[in-house]
């Protein structure tokens, strides 16, 4: 098991194209606590979007100083163009974590559901209920992408402490 400083902060990212969900949590002896969540929303050309995402991620990292960067792996869907575009932005996100020296944990959707709910085929409602139960999240948080990012952060903590992360 890997060790952290006291009360580590974990940043979870749910990658997308125009909407990237993020969730920031802290682990303490008493459990997990909610710090922040939201969306990195962007517009413009692909390069403008990449620059904006990079700048917003840098600001988040500067503000919270996360100890672990957890991000969901991209799985192939029906639209290959969308998958490629999201993959390009994922590269920008990974670069942001790497240049700030933050360990990166990549998780499949199945791993996230399994680590959060104990069942890899759990539905989104089950994940949401566990996240809302585990942390004191404000009722104003309704975005599915933001809740998913919090789940990714939680699962990222578990995977990191098991020593199963990207080096």
Image: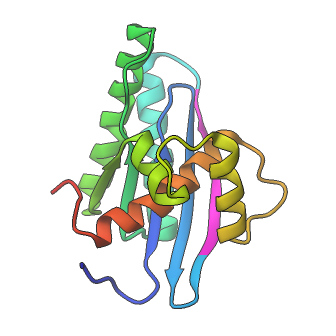
In the rendered image, residue 58, in percent from the top left (x then y), is placed at: 43, 53
Between residue 8 and residue 51, name the one nearer to us.
8
Rendered position, 121 above or below 75: below
Q: Main secondary structure of the magenta part?
A: strand
Foreground residue, 122 or 3?
A: 122
Asked if residue 68 is positioned above or below residue 57 in the image, the reply reads: below
Q: Which residues are magenta?
A: 33-42
- Residue at the right extreme of this rendering: 139
Residue 59 visible in the current orientation: no
- Determine if the magenta segment contains residue 38: yes
Give x and y (percent) for residue 54: 41, 42
Q: Where 67 sits versus 71, above or below?
A: below
What residue lies at 38% left-to-right and 67% top-to-bottom? 158
Q: Residue at x 25, y 54 (%)?
A: 99
Q: Is residue 159 left or right of residue 26?
A: left
- Residue 143 belongs to the span the image colors magenta: no
> Residue 167, how many percent across, how many down?
15, 57
Vertical position of residue 56 compared to residue 89: above or below? below
Residue 69: image x %, image y %?
A: 37, 58
Q: Is residue 96 visible?
A: yes
Quadrant of the image occupied by residue 41: top right
Colouring chosen for the image of the structure: rainbow
Q: Quadrant of the N terminus?
A: bottom left
Q: Residue at x 46, y 52 (%)?
A: 114
Q: Residue at x 77, y 53 (%)?
A: 141
Q: Is residue 162 left or right of residue 149?
A: left
Q: How many marks?
A: 0
């Amino acid at each position: 098991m890997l060790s952290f400083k006291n009360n580590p902060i974990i940043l979870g990212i749910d990658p997308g194209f125009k909407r990237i969900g993020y969730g920031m949590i802290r682990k303490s002896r008493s459990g997990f606590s909610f710090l922040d969540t939201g969306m990195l929303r962007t517009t413009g050309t692909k390069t403008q979007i990449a620059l904006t995402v990079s700048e917003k991620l840098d600001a988040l990292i500067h503000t919270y100083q996360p100890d672990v960067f957890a991000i969901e792996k991209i799985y192939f869907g029906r639209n290959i163009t969308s998958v490629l575009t999201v993959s390009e932005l994922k590269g920008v996100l990974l670069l942001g974590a790497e240049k700030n020296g933050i360990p990166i944990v990549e998780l499949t959707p199945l791993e996230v559901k399994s680590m959060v709910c104990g069942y890899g085929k759990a539905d989104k409602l089950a994940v949401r209920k566990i996240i809302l139960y585990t942390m004191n999240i404000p009722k104003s948080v309704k975005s599915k992408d933001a809740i998913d990012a919090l789940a990714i952060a939680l699962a990222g903590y578990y995977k990191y402490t098991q020593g199963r992360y990207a080096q």
